[in-house]
């Protein structure tokens, strides 16, 4: 015994000794009532200072695992049923106990369904991500924000906060939204752990009781997380086809006439996956149409900040003025730091009051550290500087990707007027999954578009995320996609 | 115009100018096509440097809100429908759209149901909190941990992480649980945003489909968050009465014989609200009984670390050995920092795989910043030092509170052998809500016990949280409670 002990860096020595002895006890190598080596003996056996052994024994005493007998030394205490021999072990099939929502969560878990063989090889060119480019992160400003805030109210930040959110951040974001033209009267704001939690909270409160679910409108295609969460909450989804300036108003009217809807989930800016920005005229028309049928809107403010060109377009919730039919979901995650899980819901005050209770029941509150760090970062004026750099960088990549697509994949229809991705549509019979298989063999991955469709369509589409690909690789990758697609098209005709 | 501009500290001047102009635009004070003052003019009007005005105009151009005409200056751009005049506003009644789960979240939201008049006056003595004492927080070590981790992998921390959690923390916690005697074979660990999210995720996956709900056992009383979330997920709750060493085994057997259960939610250590530690013998007996009926256990590891005396008792999941029927929910929140929202679920690997997908659908992942900071804090060996101080401090307060209760409230039965609270039970007919009203008038608040009961019982009980009350106030407060209770009892007899 005591010969397999190995010291590692970083963790204090006495903690390592304590954990080592604890493990020997749990493994049954040290039995209750057994005398432990004297501190001097163990110090020699393990090759660490006697002070560390003394501290380790003290810590073990504190945990009730070791007791001292004056003049006789330290002894292993009775530890109740360490390895469960006393209890008849039984095993159950957990999968069979999972309900519909849990099963759907697995079934629609895109991350778990990557086809075998399509995993990224080392050095592959990945157009699959639309996460921000880490190289842009201004770590020094983040550190500064953390230290600034800790200096002001460190103790407050580490203790419980409020379900509604960190007050200074709420106020900041209310102002921020007001500057986007939102009439704040009668509205309020709830902080969530990112956009996704916000959406999940809203849907969890709106879904019909029982297994009946509800009925929700959305753009078709739309993003996978939205489809997944709508389905998880039992909603039947009706997708409205997209036109270059936003959804097809005639199709929308037809659906509204046909059946009643519980809501419409819309992504008016830099729509994922098509990258389309819904025009101001269409925004007004959509609001007017949905208003006539009393269908509330869940607006995803996704990437609104990543405008590269064109005029400013107000979010739907701003256009709705004093109406309370729009629920706005915001987040800086895609623009700033996804690791910091902070988003917000801006909506009718009465609704927010209910959702605040839902949030409290689900997770008490969003990390105060994340919220306060983000607040101080914004307060320090870093967002503007960061956006300036990020916009310049992403715009360059955007234009370069677009140019490459136009040159190498001229036979596809391209959409996307900003954000971190472009969308390609191939001739009707084309199969982007087949294309992906061929490209993957040559080290280039992209996201086939069908997973964004609510009706099994889009087999001939794909999304190209460029935010984390170098310009050199963008050209190389798109050229390969184009060449391979051309060959496939040639084979078909 | 331009005269109500006021500079504040902290935020860069150009950002303030930009936001100010943006607001004027959104309010309609600046109209599309209108020429803005020259940078020199506005610099004089607002009393800030010309450089700040130039930067502000540039930022506004970046956002598409202002356009420059060479030789003529800056102009306000067309902003679509700023105040929604173009859309017919309509209002809806959101409350009527809320489903059962949302309505229950409000109804059972203890924070929103504090009776009027029972709010804390300034200087009041509050026995209502069981949050940690902020004065114990070792801010310097927290800062150190943050900076250490940022130095190692700052960019990684700020970008997307994994739904399952931050790998180094997962490994650390697996080791940590192994040292508590857990057999890790066939098990896995999922990081959650605190204990509460862990519980909510497990319950959301276990609840029966449709509105039928399921049936769950628990200790009676038990903590309010558990009752709330069991109800929200449609479970019928069967409470088992508590004895001084854990729940009543005969009552448990009776219930198990009578009907089938989907699970048992148990808090074996420092049970909230009674403070009872279930004995090792009883733990084994409970596991044996539940195992016979194939009822899985959801174990709340709450405050396990705050042991002040007595021998080490292994958690149920350790006693279950290779059995996979125990789901363990852990958290350092009560012990360390509640503001950092990190908890974990340790359970059967197949179950964790499902819950990982549920977690991803709900919130993508827990804040990487919180996770990595906690990891580095633990790695640096701070937990041991912190626990040593915290245990000494809380133990002193615990013993002092106990002594005060024994002296001033001798007619109540006291329970609680650790943690941050004690539980008092008065003679049967006594009403602690009436007592609370009288005490509140004199500036002392506590938590009436009935909210912890699943069956409307416990009107004669109360919880005394002492973690954030000074020793002087503990004595003053408990004496007042005792004196007032004695008077009430005198009136009754």
Image (cartoon, coloured by chain):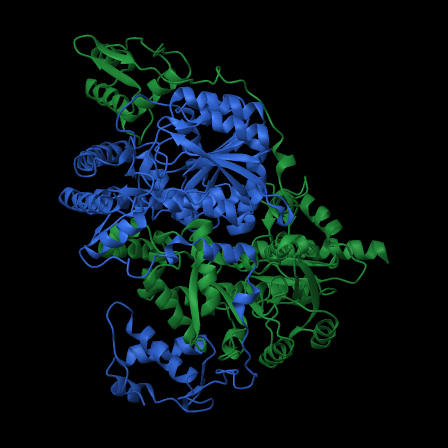
Chain colours: A blue, B green
Tell me residue A63's x, y (percent).
Answer: 45, 75
Question: Residue at the location (21% across, 37% down)?
Answer: A405
Tell me residue A141's x, y (percent).
Answer: 25, 41
Foreground of the two, B156 or B219: B156
In screen coordinates, is A288 left or right of B120?
left
**Could you tell me which quadrant the N terminus of chain A lies in?**
bottom left
**Could you tell me which quadrant the C terminus of chain A lies in?**
top left
Q: Quadrant of residue B275?
A: bottom right
Residue at the extreme front: A493
Tell me residue A217's x, y (percent).
Answer: 51, 35
Question: Residue at the location (55% across, 24% down)?
Answer: A291
For residue A475, say whether it is visible: yes
Question: Residue at the location (48% across, 83% down)?
Answer: A83
In screen coordinates, is B486 left or right of B167?
right
Q: Quadrant of residue A17?
A: bottom left
Residue at the extreme left: A472
């Amino acid at each position: 015994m005591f010969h397999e002990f190995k010291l590692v860096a970083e963790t204090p020595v006495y903690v390592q000794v304590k954990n080592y002895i604890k493990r020997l006890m749990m493994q049954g190598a040290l039995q209750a009532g057994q005398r432990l080596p004297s501190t001097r003996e163990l110090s020699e056996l393990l090759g660490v200072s006697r002070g560390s052994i003394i501290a380790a024994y003290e810590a073990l005493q504190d945990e009730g695992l070791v007791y001292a007998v004056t003049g006789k030394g330290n002894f292993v205490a009775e530890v109740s049923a360490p390895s469960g021999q006393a209890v008849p072990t039984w095993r159950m099939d957990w999968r069979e106990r999972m309900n519909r929502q849990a099963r759907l969560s697995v079934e629609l878990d895109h991350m778990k369904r990557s086809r075998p063989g399509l995993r990224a090889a080392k050095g592959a060119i990945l157009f699959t991500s639309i996460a921000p480019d880490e190289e842009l992160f201004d770590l020094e400003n983040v550190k500064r924000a953390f230290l600034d805030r800790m200096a002001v109210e460190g103790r407050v930040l580490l203790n419980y906060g409020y379900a509604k959110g960190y007050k200074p951040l709420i106020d900041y974001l209310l102002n921020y939204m007001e500057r986007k033209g939102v009439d704040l009267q009668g509205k309020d704001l709830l902080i969530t752990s990112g956009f996704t939690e916000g959406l999940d909270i809203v849907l969890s409160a709106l879904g019909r009781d029982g297994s009946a679910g509800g009925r929700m409108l959305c753009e078709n295609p739309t993003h996978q997380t939205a489809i997944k969460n709508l389905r998880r909450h039992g909603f039947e989804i009706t997708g409205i086809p997209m036109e270059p300036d936003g959804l097809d108003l005639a199709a929308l009217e037809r659906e509204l006439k046909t059946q009643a809807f519980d809501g419409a989930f819309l992504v008016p800016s830099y729509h994922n996956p098509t990258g389309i920005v819904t025009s101001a005229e269409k925004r007004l028309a959509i609001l007017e149409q949905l208003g006539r049928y009393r269908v509330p809107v869940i607006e995803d403010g996704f990437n609104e900040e990543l405008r590269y060109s064109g005029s400013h377009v107000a979010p739907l919730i701003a256009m709705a003025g004093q109406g309370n039919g729009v629920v706005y979901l915001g987040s800086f995650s895609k623009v700033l730091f996804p690791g910091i899980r902070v988003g917000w819901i801006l909506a009718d005050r009465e609704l927010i009051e209910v959702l605040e209770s839902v949030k409290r029941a689900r997770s008490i509150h969003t990390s105060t550290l994340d919220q306060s760090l983000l607040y101080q970062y914004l307060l320090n004026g870093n967002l503007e500087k960061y956006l300036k750099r990020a916009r310049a960088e992403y715009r360059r990549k955007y234009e370069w990707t677009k140019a490459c697509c136009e040159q190498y994949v001229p036979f596809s229809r391209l959409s996307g007027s900003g954000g971190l991705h472009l969308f390609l549509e191939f001739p009707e019979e084309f199969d982007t999954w087949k294309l992906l298989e061929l490209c993957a063999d040559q080290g280039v991955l992209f996201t086939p578009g069908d997973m964004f469709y609510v009706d099994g369509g889009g087999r001939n589409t794909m999304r190209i995320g460029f935010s984390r690909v170098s310009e050199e690789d963008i050209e190389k990758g798109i050229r390969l996609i184009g060449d391979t697609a051309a060959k496939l098209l040639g084979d078909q005709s």
